[in-house]
Image (spheres, helix red, strand yellow):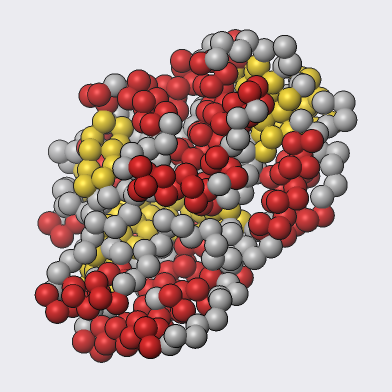
Amino acid sequence: MKHIVILGAGPGGLGAAWRLRELSYDSWELYEGENYAGGLASSHKDEKGFTWDLGGHVQFSHYGTFDKMMDYLLGEDGWIYHERESWVWLLDRFVPYPFQNNIHRLPTEAKWECLQGLIELYKDKQQKKPADFEEWILSTLGKGIGKYFMLPYNFKVWAYKPSIMDYRWLGERVAVADLERVSKNIIFNTDDVSWGPNNRFRFPKFGGTGAIWRALAGKLPAGKIHMEHRVCRIETEKKRIHFENGKSTGYDLLITTIPLDQFIEMSDLKYDSVKDLTYSSTHVIGLGLYGKAPAHLNKKCWMYFPESNCPFYRVTVFSHYSPNNSADISKYWSLMGEVSESPCKAVESEKVVEDTIKGMINTRLIESEDYVYNTWHRRLEYGYPIPCLKRDKVLKALLPDLMKKDIYSRGRFGAWKYEVANQDHAFMQGWECVNYILYDVPELTLWYPDVVNKGHELLGKSWY
């Protein structure tokens, strides 16, 4: 029996461990650098008693396996269910998401610019294939929608201009505007909000998103999970991993969820192509606020902010997800903002909380700084894996070559594929990787993202 070592106790690593447990495969161990499970899907309670996620996470799934796992871990009563209410704050008003289906909410001039852009596309019968994400936006959604929302928002969220990004990752991530549908919404003044795989979602009643992954880790054999083991060096020829605490371990097969560029840097491998992979960092800023959420935010889940009058690209009404995210829901509510950072988009870390508060005042989320009871800030070095223009070429060569060396790089940053980087995707990458290693079953999530992401639409339910 070959010994399998898993690096990382985020959704990807835990997915692999969970599958090994299901199959009663005994020769494995998992190592995690932090003293908690969950990775980017972990949750943290601050000193005032507020719970915070590391971003605007919600639970929706493309997989029956993942759904059953969540039911098992937290039980039927461990969840709060929500109908998605997501909005775009633009031109001093809220527009329902997806923006491109709801331009009837805009002022007349902006509404016409957006509609005119779609009409121009409809009249242009000889459109060329786009070369990048920016060209895709303009050739699919038009100049008006690009100007008001898609171009500024995507720079804000990715921290890179869409012109350096590919577009083939999109899949179900972006709603394509339909001229007839948009025109009908304008004429009848109708909101169109049902698009997307997450129009209904659930959230843990207690403990934030991290409650899922803490519960899963707690179901695994304690002797096989090793916390506070941060990798510092990997000898791939000797198949040995060294940790900062001075310990080391050997392996026959390695499943790693460490960011791919970091893994290569720590190893004895040389792949210059990994330098072509790009990522952005994320600042998560939590505000605990006095009182109750105002009426205009009371039912909203999250909001997008494309304009320059605030630093954040998204804000979540986090106390709406669960009242237990607040220190005391009878006294306080909470907002959580996300700010991106990259070499192309600098952020002053020491000022980001102050700037976030000012931005929330500018966008009418709060009336004044006097409402702020508590603040929390966490910077994530690795926030988003960027679907840059060279990404697919790099991954197509690099991931299979690592597999020849008995190294399986999976997960949000291990596989570097944003289109399959949600929690369910990352978990299933680990789960499917074990199936491939032991039974040679193809890994659908990693190699066929479109099939997996469209499967729930085609079948009317989740994959296995």
Q: Quadrant of residue 102?
A: bottom left
Q: Quadrant of residue 188?
A: bottom left
Residue 334 rendering spot, x and y as whole percentages: 28, 47
Judging depth in this view, the residue of 158 and 100 nearest the camera is: 100
Residue 440 visible in image: yes
Q: Quadrant of residue 456?
A: top left
Judging depth in this view, the residue of 322 and 390 nearest the camera is: 390
Horizontal relation, residue 125 to residue 281: left or right: left
Quarter holding the C terminus is top left
Horizontal relation, residue 89 to residue 276: left or right: left
Q: Residue sitting at 24 percent across and 72 percent down?
A: 181
Q: Residue sitting at 35 percent across and 48 percent down?
A: 457
Q: Residue sitting at 72 percent across and 17 percent down?
A: 3
Residue 123 rendering spot, x and y as whole percentages: 38, 88
Judging depth in this view, the residue of 428 and 353 nearest the camera is: 428
Q: Residue sitting at 69 percent across and 35 percent down?
A: 408
Up-down relation of residue 458 to residue 37 (above or below): below
